[in-house]
Amino acid sequence: MTWWASISRRRRYLETTARHPLNVLRNVLAVLTGAIALIVGFMFSLVMLAIIAVVALAVWGYLMWKTRKVRTRCVSKRLSAM
């Protein structure tokens, strides 16, 4: 495609858009819909990140609680060896 063909296609597009104001409204609605979809996706990812963080914290707490006796024995053996 040559550069003048690209210019003529763009000119035709702009003339068609100027004649039909519904196309402008349709484009504005498409941009708004895309922006809303991005915002909703971002919010969903933040909620998922929070859920994953809570689950990871719960697993870490559970493991720390279950291994507390082993850890205290290791510390006491290390202190008695000194």
Image (cartoon, rainbow, N blue to C red):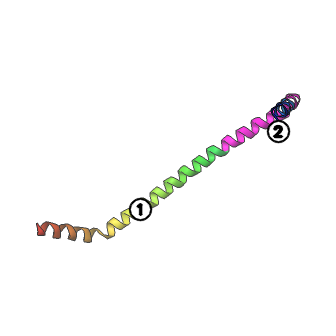
Q: Which mark is residue 36?
A: none
Residue 1 image position (x, y, % from top left): 82, 39
Picture residue at 80% right of the left edge, 34% below the top: 25
Of labels 1 and 2, earlier in sequence is 2
Could you say whether the residue bearing mark 2 is in a helix, strand or loop? loop
Q: Position of residue 51 (x, y in %)?
A: 50, 57
Going by the numbered disc 1, the residue's amino acid type is Ala
Mark 1 secondary-structure assignment = helix
Question: Looking at the picture, how far across and down is residue 5, in whole percent?
Answer: 85, 34
Q: Residues within 10 Å of mark 1 (few under 14, many from 20)?
A: few
Name the residue rendered at 54%, 52% in the picture: 47
- The relative height of residue 33 versus residue 76 in the rendered view (above or below) is above
Q: Is residue 36 left or right of residue 29?
A: left
Viewed as shown, does residue 72 lie left or right of 2?
A: left
The residue carrying mark 1 is: 58
Vertical relation: 28 (above or below) 48: above
63 left or right of 42?
Answer: left
Circle 2 residue:
1
Residue 6 point in image, percent of width and height: 82, 34
**From what the image shows, is residue 34 above or below residue 64?**
above
Left or right: where 52 falls relative to 44 = left
Query: Alpha-carbon neighbours of circle 2 within 10 Å: few (<14), some, or many (≥20)?
Result: few
Which segment did they paint magenta? 14-36
Q: Quadrant of residue 82?
A: bottom left
Splitting the image into 4 quarters, where does residue 64 fall?
bottom left
| Main secondary-structure element of the magenta-colored stretch | helix
* Residue type pointed to by label 2: Met
- In the rendered image, residue 31 lying in the magenta stretch gets the answer yes
Q: Which residue sits at x=45%, y=57%?
A: 54
Is residue 11 or residue 50 the one in the foreground? 11
Callout in the foreground (1, 2): 2
